[in-house]
Each structure stands twice: as C-alpha cells, then as structure tokens.
Image (cartoon, rainbow, N blue to C red):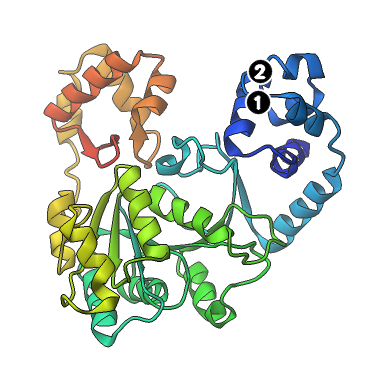
Amino acid sequence: MGDNLVFKIALTLVPSVGAITAKQLISYCGSAEAVFKTPKAKLLKIPGIGLQTATAILEFRDFESAEKEIHFLERNGVRALFYVDADYPSRLKHFPDAPVMLYVRGTADLNPERVLAVVGTRQPTPQGIVACEEIIQSLKTYHVQVVSGLAYGIDAVAHQAALGAGLPTLAVMGNGLNRIYPAAHKGLAAEIVRQNGALLTEFLSDTGPDRENFPMRNRIVAAMADALLVVETGARGGSMITANLANDYNKDVFAVPGRVKDLKSEGCNNLIKTHKAGLISSGEDIAYFMQWDPPTEKQPGIQRTLFTDLAPQEQMVLEIMRESADPWSIDRLSYQAQLQGSEIAAVLLNLEFKGLVKSLPGKRFLPV
C-alpha cells in the first residue's frame, strides 16, 4: 500500500492531532509525510498549531503501529481511504470533522446516488420492526443504499431489511475491524459484505467498542446520508443524538410517529412536534419528500443529437461528468474543469435545463 500510507495513518496517531488539525497541517505542508519532516519553526507558523502540537509531531516515533495496521489491512482485504481520495464518501468529506482516514471492508459504493440512514431503539416493539421492514422494502425500486450502525434493534432490522430487498447496506462501526460488535451480529456483518455492502470505521483495527466511540460513529451515519429515518426511540439516547446531528448537517430527517404515551415513540413524536423531522408512514412518503423517482432506462441517441447545441464549456463539463458514474459535487467539477464556482454553477444550470444533468440532494449532480 506504499510508504505514504504509513505517514497518513501515523498522523492519526499523534497526540493532540485530530481531524481538523491534521487537515490544516496537510494543507500547509502538502502531504502527511511532509508534516513529519517540516521543521518546528515552520510548523509553528501554521494557524492553530502551537508548541505542544508541533513538539508531539516531531517527537512521534511510533511508525511501527502504522506499519502493523497496514499489514492488517493487506491480510484482511480492507481498503484504507484518505480524505482526498476519489472513493472517500463525498457526502462526508466536506464536514470539517470528517475523519482523515476511513477503513472499509466490502465492495459497497461509498458515493451512491441515494442514501438513507436508519436509526432507532435497541429494543423495538413488533410494530416498530414491521414499520422499519415495510418502509425499506417499499424503497426497493428507488435503488437506495441503507446506512446504519450494526447495533441491536432497529439498526440490525434495517440492515436485514435492506439485504432482503436486495439493497446495498453500509454498517458504520464504533470499533476497529478486527472484531464485530456486538458479537451476535457476526453473521449479519458477513452477509452485508457478501451482498455487496460494506463495514466502515474510522478506528484502527485493534480499537475496542469504547463508549466514547459511538457518538463519533453517529456523526458519520448522519453525514453520509441524504435523509435520516428514526424508527422508535426514547426522548434521549444515540438515535436522538444522530437525529440532531443530521439536522445540524442540513440533512432531511423523518420519523415514524407513535402513540402519545408510548415511551419508545417519545423521541420520534418530539422530533415531529418540534419540526425537526417530517412525519412519514411509508417508503413512498420518503421518496415523495426527497423527490426520488424510480430509475428509468436511458434513451440512447437523444443526448448525442443535443451535443451540437452545447456551448464549449457545457460540452467540456458534460464529457468530464461522463467519465465517472459517481455523483459530482460543484467543488470537484470546478477543480476538474478549471472553472470558477460561479461559472460551473451556470453551466450545470444550463445542462439541467437541457435535460442532460440531474440535480441530486446535497448539491450533487449526475449526467442523465
């Protein structure tokens, strides 16, 4: 995997260097390797880098742990994604606290067209289980990727329902990939990987399922989704944390309502009551609010006839977009086409009017 990966992983091991600081260092130094080779005087000139952080970087010697991690990745078929890699989740990367490194076991596309995160209580009622299953099953025709946290209860129900519907599902973990937590979900995790899904974590392989890891896991679940669905939850707990994070991230949040005095629906009802979630009772409700249409077959030939009507910049941008099946962000297109943000926005708007580009949630675009 290369010496460069050693430095990328090592940077995440340096005390007092979190995701935001690491990205600041890399943006000024040019690479993770350069961070470790930059003199202290230059490190101290970087905004936000004090003496303690600079000293921790230059005194860091535990590259052996990074090399050990690489051996684990190679032995277990795990992908390591750096935050500037093309395969890194585009929905996640623009958040300042997005992990510098992600570790992925499985073949799931981390930049699919549509993503629904599902969270809820670890002790669902039979009604909650049925509601979750039926909602996900009804989204089958919309080709939605289902994201959850592999926990007991609604998380597991969501993963299993996605597998049953033939939808890809992504399990975000609060520990390293050398174990499955909870252990009872080893079979489920294996099936997720087998059916073109994936297990994803920001933690090194030997990291245990420590309590403080799960709020960090929750922010990834919220950030990677276009919409978040809450199915049965109390007034407090991990599901409410994730729902509030999703609102902070400007994601669409939906909740299944419950009876007024039902404690397991108290959180859902409160989210709806305070206008932090939309009330839904079916997958079709979600598709309607998200403006998801069932995928249709592309009609060959139509786009070619329109090509002659395109301005040079429009034709260039469309050709770039067709080089990848993944949705494009404005920033990514602006970089590839070497156009200013205002220019690329105008080009995309014209292409959308001509029916050659489709706008997706999260300000992403896909060629039709």
Q: CA distance from mark 2 to mark 1?
A: 7 Å
Residue 180 in percent (x, y) is at 60, 72
Q: Residues within 10 Å of mark 1 (few under 14, many from 20)?
A: many
Say what secondary structure mark 1 lies in: helix
Nearer to me, 236 or 148: 236
Q: Is residue 112 above or below residue 18?
A: below
- Residue 162, quarter of picture: bottom left
Residue identifier under label 2: 46
Say what secondary structure mark 2 lies in: loop
Residue 57 in percent (x, y) is at 78, 32
* Earlier-in-chain disc, 2 versus 1: 1
Q: Where does the C terminus fall, quadrant-wise? A: top left
Outermost residue toward the bottom in this view: 126
Compared across the picture, whether 81 is left or right of 333 comes to right
Residue identifier under label 1: 25
Q: Is residue 152 above or below residue 175?
A: below
The kind of residue tagged 1 is Leu
Residue at x-position 41% and y-position 77%: 122
Compared across the picture, whether 92 is left or right of 263 comes to right
Compared across the picture, whether 323 is left or right of 62 comes to left
Q: Is residue 220 above or below residue 35?
A: below
The kind of residue tagged 2 is Ile
Mark 2–mark 1 contact, CB under 8 Å? Answer: yes
Nearer to me, 358 or 364: 364
Residue 20 in percent (x, y) is at 57, 34
